[in-house]
Amino acid sequence: MKKILPFLFVLLHTVTFSQEDAWVYFNDKPNAQTYLSNPLSMLSQRALDRRAAQNIAVDIQDVPIHQNYIDQITAVPGISVMAKSKWMNALHIRGTQSVINGLTTLSFVHHVDFANKTLNTNKNTNTAASGLFNKTLDVQTNFPYGASAAQIQMLNGHLLHQQDFTGTGKIIAVMDAGFPGVDTTDPFLRLRTNNQIKGGYNFVNRNANFYTGFQHGTQVLSNMAAYVDNQLVGTAPDASYYLFVTEDINSESPLEESLWVEAAETADSLGVDVINSSLGYNLFTNAAYNHTYQDMDGNTTFITRGANIAFTRGMIVVVSAGNEGAKPWKFITAPADATNVLTVGAVSASEVRAGFSSQGPTADGRIKPDVMAMGAASVVTTQTGEIGYNNGTSFSAPTLAGLVACLWQALPNKTNAQLVQIIKESADRYTNPDNFYGYGIPDFQQALNTALSTASFAVNGFNLYPNPTAGTITITSPDNTVARFVLYNSLGQEIMKKNISSLQEETISLESFTSGIYCYTIVSGEATFSGKLIKK
């Protein structure tokens, strides 16, 4: 996150680097079967439910590192264990080069990987597998957005809010540099009053005080969660949040990548749905650790590999593209290069790319950023509760991440991969992407409409089509089934009821209804199936 405090390099130029950062990777997890036979010993029920909903199996990467391995490494004189990753089966360690190299003599050590790549003698590559409760509709939500209207309306997020998709039931984890003021200031009062902060952790200081550090995290969170009438409304004001401090503002170190991965693993275990990260890494305080553009290939840096694994666990990871567009580096930073993260660049209120917004492609030629959102003169709140403006992809990412949660609330049966694809397809440059705008600016109302516009809806033998419809719908039901179709308007009021027989197709006219989105239920015995219906 050097772009936030560039003067750190001047302040820290006298630091010496006798100690090296490295990762030590292990061969196996001897007690894996014990954990795999009891998934609740490593993942919460909510995490398991998220996996089950997407047909994602618990696997060896979910199993913790063998404690005996950790103990033996910790006991080696001159070695400091700084972080750990069960997904990678690795520890982030610090020590002299000779002591770290000596670890390779241990039978359970697969290899070590120095952050300073010139010190690596092995040719190992560490690849990470990659893959691809609704509120009662009794009122429409029309928030007093004030100056923040532009950043929400650009994405048609206000239309989701009007349908009461405001993030309820979804959990977002925020990885950042600190969250001072979130526990005291008025813009987050609604968040606190409704108990939407589920918890957090300060991985940098290894304590539970996450309401400290640099206010960058506070500002990022405000794009999603703050609420001040007629000034600032976040994009997911009713979502719940975990706040994780992973960025050490005092220096730029590869350790921060490891802390990020450790936080992502924690988020996974807690059942988080969406991760927002407005952090990016390319250059470090110790220049020997610097990444190169060639490292931005989607599978090289530690943090990027961690982000890829997070996606395979069923979460959606939203990251800022970086603020390097006008600098010599100019390209995206890690983990924005990860294959399956939603990488977000920044545009102005007039939908023109901000000059600072990092560009693509990735080193292996993929389109990045993926999408754009408002990051120039974005409305935020500071640690003192003051409402103001700030610039950066740091703010376009959370603005979009909040709406990802809202869209997932509206489409709870979609997988993370399906939702990411739907969002990309809704963007205004989807058919003609480039490496400045990616696929363009998403339209979240269009994304919702597209998801509801499948050729037919079929659940337990019931079929409803077409959706959207210009005037009529047809419903078929399984044999020997009698059911009831009930249609509701946006206020939750019943406006139609029809009995459905399995002996014939039931054609229902909606000609008399105005265009819009309606809710329906199909009641059959004790089973009830619900959905959305679009009238053109």
Image (cartoon, rainbow, N blue to C red):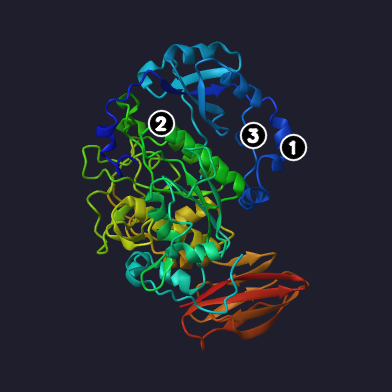
Query: Is there any visible trace of residue 465 in the rendered image?
Result: yes
Report whether 15 appears left or right of 176: left
Seen at 57% across and 28% down, the residue is 89
In front of the other: label 2 or label 3?
A: 2
Marks 2 and 3, the one that precedes in the sequence: 3
Seen at 30% across and 54% down, the residue is 346
Residue 366: x, y in percent? 35, 41
Q: Helix, strand or loop at disc 3? A: loop
Mark number, residue 321: none
Residue 201: x, y in percent? 53, 44
Name the one closer to the observer, 105 or 27: 105
Q: Note whether 99 is above or below 236 in the view shown.
A: above
Number of residues whose C-alpha sits closer than 10 Å to that of mark 1, classed few (under 14), some (14–19) or many (20 or more): few
Seen at 29% across and 36% down, the residue is 8
Number of residues whose C-alpha sits closer than 10 Å to that of mark 3, classed few (under 14), some (14–19) or many (20 or more): many
Marks 1 and 2, the one that precedes in the sequence: 1
